[in-house]
Amino acid sequence: MSVHDSERKGSRPPVSTEGLEALLDRWVSDLERGGPWSDKSPESPSAPPNRIVPEQPPLFDEPPPATEHSTPASEPRENVQERAPTTADEVRSARARPRVQGLGVLFPEDSAPVLLAREQGQLVHRGTVAVRGPCALSREEWGRLGVSATSAQGLEFVLAWFGAPFDAAGAGPSWGVWSFSGDALVHALACWKRLEPATFEARLGTLGIRVVGESPESPALAVVDVTTGQWVQGRQALALLGEDPLLFAALVRAGREKGARLGQVACLVEPSLALTGEDSPRVFALRWHAELRLGRRGVSRFDALLREEAGAAGGSVRAGLRFASALRSSGHAREAGEVRRIVSSPELDGVSAR
């Protein structure tokens, strides 16, 4: 190491050996100098070129002073949407408050950063909020969305085993339990905004991410491009969400809100409430799985088999096994195996009491 390198990296405690003790000394020294969030961490601007840097003004070590458009932490969220930023300068100021270091984004209100990853050049986040667990929807919340107990149990099973966490995000971008992308992603955000507008504005609106449109059936996504100072919509808006680490992390963080979780499920069930039929969690699970993997054509294919088996004892099980056999014959071995798991799962023998 040269003298200049030593000056750049700061002083280190003397290393007495070149073995394990030396490695431990260096590790402790790195921790004392700030760890992964220090300015000289491996993800700093001097790191290899795979670091993504959003096009925005330099970040501050401390958040800038509050303006008339920022909201103190103690202020109720219901008031946030009244002062949502409306100009590029206001959005730029709001986006300067989180700290972006490499693929980690620390929002000022949070104690831990949102940690992203890159796969094949695309930002991804595997998710941390499971469909089942402390953040699961209660039966009352399923009922609030107009979902029966049997349908809720079937959908919850499919989301838990074959879907994704609520705050998962991938290339495209895709988001949430159903990996919503494109128009479906915009609809999911619109459902959240309709159910809980205050939290939507607090998590996304303040950063210049909006859902607009005259009709609830055809919402549009609008995002501020701070490099041009203009609002962009459609594919350009989705591209910004998928490419800018700060906006991508904001989307991930948004999936942890209860309103966002409700919005994701509402986006699924609103056009699917006509899928009634046999009052069985297993049948609902088979239908939801068919829609997840194969779309509405898959649901129609399964329903045709279900009608053929109607009235016979164990008809829904036979319909499911026939569906699995047809999938395997058509080259969908993975989907066929998943259908057999649904057919045989004891979790779907009755309605949960939760």
Image (cartoon, grey):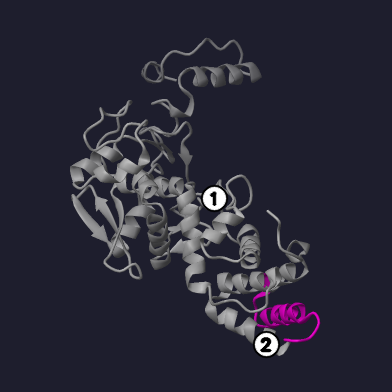
Residue 155: horizontal and vertical position, in percent?
A: 61, 64
**In this view of the protein, can residue 118 be seen by the observer?**
no
Distance between mark 2 and mark 1 Cα atoms: 38 Å
- Region of the chain picked out in magenta, as a range: 310-335
State the image coordinates of residue 263 (x, y, percent, origin top left): 46, 58
Q: Which residue is drawn at the image coordinates 56% and 21% (left, top)?
A: 27
Where is residue 67? Give x, y as percent.
22, 32
Residue 27: say if magenta: no
SS of the residue at dot 2?
A: helix
Q: Secondary structure at mark 1?
A: loop
Residue 63 higher or lower than 48, as above or below: above
Q: Amino acid at mark 1?
A: Arg
Which disc is residue 307 wearing? Answer: 2
Residue 149 or residue 214, whichever sits in front: 149
Name the residue located 28 percent from the left edge and 49 percent from the top edge.
208
Magenta: main secondary structure:
helix
Residue at horizontal 42%, vertical 56%?
195
Left or right: residue 302 versus residue 180 is right
Q: Earlier in the sequence, mark 2 or mark 1?
A: 1
* Label 2 CA crowd tier, 10 Å (few <14, some 14–19, many 20+): few
Residue 99 visible in this rendered orientation of the protein: yes
Residue 40, above or below 13? below
Q: Which residue is mark 1?
A: 126
